[in-house]
Image: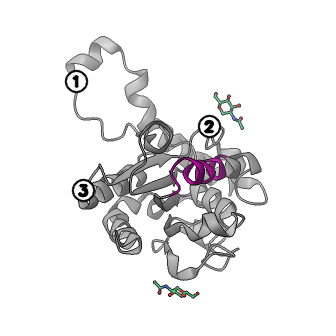
Amino acid sequence: MKFQFTATVVFLCAITATPVLSNPIEDGSHLKPRQDEGETSNDLENGPCLSAFFIFARGSTEPGNMGEIVGPQVCSDLQTTLGASVIGCQGVGSPYNATLADNFLPQNTSPTDIGAATTLFDLAQSKCPNSKIVAGGYSQGTAVMDGSIQALPAPIQDNIYGVVLFGFTRNLQDDGRIPNFPTNKTLVFCATGDLVCDGTLEITAAHLSYGTDASAAAAFLVKALDL
Ligand SMILES: *[C@@H]1O[C@H](CO)[C@@H](O)[C@H](O)[C@H]1NC(C)=O
Ligand SMILES: *[C@@H]1O[C@H](CO)[C@@H](O)[C@H](O)[C@H]1NC(C)=O
């Protein structure tokens, strides 16, 4: 199980590390849109209060704080639908460093990782109490959101209008839901053949397929926000 997970990470790193490792001179002549780069969004931390914010936790080893598999796509769909002056995006960054080893801990991530998400939900409440919140996670990021949201105080939970989880690593353990959080505010995407949804940490091609669900996830969140 561990071996299979590691093998896939090598694969993921091979994709993401290529631009960084290339010779800069050679890079210039081969410059093309780098859709595999991973993105960083800090609208809640750095921007003004908007009507809504999307807080997202990326998967293990994903670059930036939004990753690349599905987080940036959901953000972009939300902003296309609602407007970038209406909804901002915020990735869960350090001290959530999305390390592989943390998947093997009891909560499928660490208390520190979970704390990084909780810090952002707390920030949303203190800085922008009138902003509605939606959230999401991919892979280890689903465990981060699960662990954080189930333990939030009721007023902060009540202000989270919808959560989307892609490749939910605690799907089996937590019965397809975030414990202590309304199931009708939660949408879990588990692709056919994604074995992390069956209580393993075995990575298959299906686990990398969630970009295709971004627009359905964004539509669910837009409806839940009801702006
Ligand atoms: C995450 O990375 C940052 C920056 O490198 C570091 O300061 C922090 O200690 C790391 N967090 C953990 C939990 O290791
Ligand atoms: C979700 O379920 C709660 C009860 O748990 C209910 O009060 C609420 O109206 C439901 N929301 C939607 C959107 O169905």
Q: Residue 168, how many percent across, how many down?
A: 57, 66
Measured along the vertical axis of the image, is residue 206 above or below residue 97? below
Q: Position of residue 126 (x, y in %)?
A: 59, 50
At 63% from the left and 72% from the top, the residue drawn is: 178
For residue 18, say whether it is visible. yes
Is residue 201 among what the camera can see?
no
| Disc nearest the viewer among 3 and 1 | 3
Relative image position of residue 181 (x, y in whole percent): 63, 75
Pick whichever of labels 3 and 2 is earlier in the sequence. 3
Query: What is the number of the mark on residue 226?
Result: none
Amino acid residing under circle 3: Thr
Q: Residues within 10 Å of mark 3 (few under 14, many from 20)?
A: few
Find out if the beta carbon at label 2 lies less than 8 Å from the nearest ligand 1 atom.
Answer: yes
Q: CA distance from mark 3 to mark 2?
A: 28 Å
Q: What residue does disc 1 label?
A: 30
Q: Disc 3 designates what residue? A: 80
For the residue pair 3 and 157, the one nearer the viewer reads as 157
Asked if the magenta segment contains residue 126, the reply would be yes
Taking the spot 45% from the left edge, 60% from the top edge, the residue there is 205
Q: Earlier in the sequence, mark 3 or mark 1?
A: 1
Callout 2–callout 1 Cβ contact below 8 Å: no
Q: Circle 2 sits on which residue? A: 94
As shown in the figure, which amino acid type bears the numbered disc 1?
His
* Range covered by the magenta-colored residues: 116-129
Disc 2 marks a residue whose amino acid type is Ser
Please identify the quarter of the rendering in which residue 209 is found. bottom left
Q: Measuring 61% from the left and 60% from the top, which residue is drawn there?
A: 145
Name the chief secondary structure element in magenta: helix
**Disc 2 residue crowd, few under 14, some 14–19, many 20+, Cα 10 Å:** few
